Image: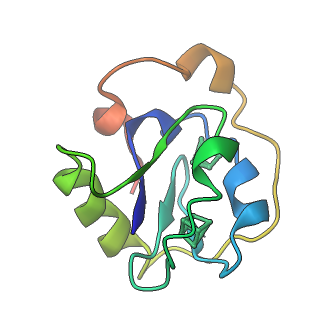
Amino acid sequence: TYVVTDNCVKCKYTDCVEVCPVDCFYEGENFLVINPDECIDCGVCEPECPAEAIKPDTEPGLEEWLEINAKYCEVWPNITVQKEPMAEAKKWDGVENKLQYLST
Ligand code: SF4
Ligand code: F3S
């Protein structure tokens, strides 16, 4: 599966949702997640994210983010249409360790 990670927090550009062939993105207040059971591993969303926040779970160190994706995709609503990024997306793009700002 692919996983939404750290740099999506407080940016939420949402370009990713437009390209997903199985519509498996789910939207929280300041973050999106992928449903790992629905993702077909096509990879088309990865290069679409301006924040480079989407990664394959084969990359090391993503266990915590995979858990977050798996947990909140069960709770948050589906999103399939792109919307405006968060107001301060540019400011937050690239800031490290944004897990502490994740709104759940
Ligand atoms: Fe959707 Fe493909 Fe991205 Fe999985 S890898 S979330 S199926 S676009
Ligand atoms: Fe987040 Fe990137 Fe999608 S910032 S909302 S994963 S386009």
User: Which image quarter holds the N terminus?
Assistant: bottom left
Left or right side of 33 for 59: left
Q: How is the image coloured?
A: rainbow
Viewer-side residue, 30 vs 5: 5
Left or right side of 58 for 18: right
The quadrant in which residue 37 appears is: bottom left
Viewer-side residue, 57 vs 7: 57
Judged from the image, the quadrant occupied by ligand 1 is: bottom right
User: Which image quarter holds the C terminus?
Assistant: bottom left
On the image, the x and y values in percent for residue 91 come to: 60, 14
At 48% from the left and 39% from the top, the residue drawn is 9
At 81% from the left and 56% from the top, the residue drawn is 82
Taking 51 as reference, is 37 above or below it?
below
Counting every numbered tag in the picture gives 0
Taking 61 as reference, is 23 above or below it?
below
On the image, the x and y values in percent for residue 96 come to: 34, 20
Taking 62 as reference, is 1 above or below it?
below
Taking 45 as reference, is 26 above or below it?
below
The quadrant in which residue 84 appears is: top right
On the image, the x and y values in percent for residue 6 come to: 38, 38
On the image, the x and y values in percent for residue 100 come to: 28, 35
At 48% from the left and 18% from the top, the residue drawn is 94
At 56% from the left and 22% from the top, the residue drawn is 93
